[in-house]
Image (cartoon, helix red, strand yellow):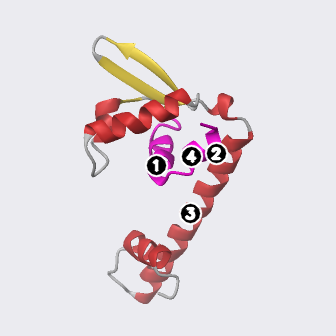
Amino acid sequence: MDAVRVVAEPRRRAILWLIWDEELSAGEIAERFDVTFGAVSQHLKVLRDAGLVTLRQEGRKRYYRADQDAMGPLATYLQTMWADRLDALAELAEQAERAGSTEDPERAARARQADPRA
């Protein structure tokens, strides 16, 4: 499977974001998702098979890290996409603060993505 198809899946992009700058064990990655460890493990296998992550085994633990060099131009695209989303989230937080709102800006951003009319 080519790298673009692999990262088209949102949960795989989220996993890459988690391990972009730091190495995490499979268990640490799985703890951050609302799916089973097995589901996260399958996503990690797809990422590994596509050459997008490195794997280091220490005893029974497996540690993963995004392999930015192997991604080539895809790495730049992902970083730009994440930066744009963080900028948008920061803007929402500032708007909420100025308006005195107690609404969670991240929740509001997810709602806008789900329903662009919101």
Where residue 26 appears, as percent x and y from the top left, is 34, 31
Decide: marks 1, 2 in contact (CB < 8 A)? no
Q: Which residue is mark 4?
A: 7
Q: How many marks?
A: 4
Report the span colored magenta: 1-22
Question: Which image quadrant: the N terminus?
Answer: top right
Which callout, 1 or 2, points at the residue further toward the start of the chain? 2
Residue 4, numbered circle: 2
Inspect the image, locate mark 3, and give the three-letter code of the amino acid beneath it.
Arg
| Closest to the observer, 94 or 87 | 87
Inspect the image, locate mark 4, and give the three-letter code of the amino acid beneath it.
Val
Residue 85, numbered circle: 3
Question: Which residue is located at x 29 percent, y 11 percent?
Answer: 59
Judge whether 61 appears above or below 33 on screen. above
Q: Is residue 104 left or right of residue 46?
A: left
**How far, Cα to Cα, is label 4 from label 2?**
5 Å
**How far, Cα to Cα, is label 4 from label 1?**
9 Å
| Closest to the observer, 105 or 31 | 31
Residue 14, numbered circle: 1
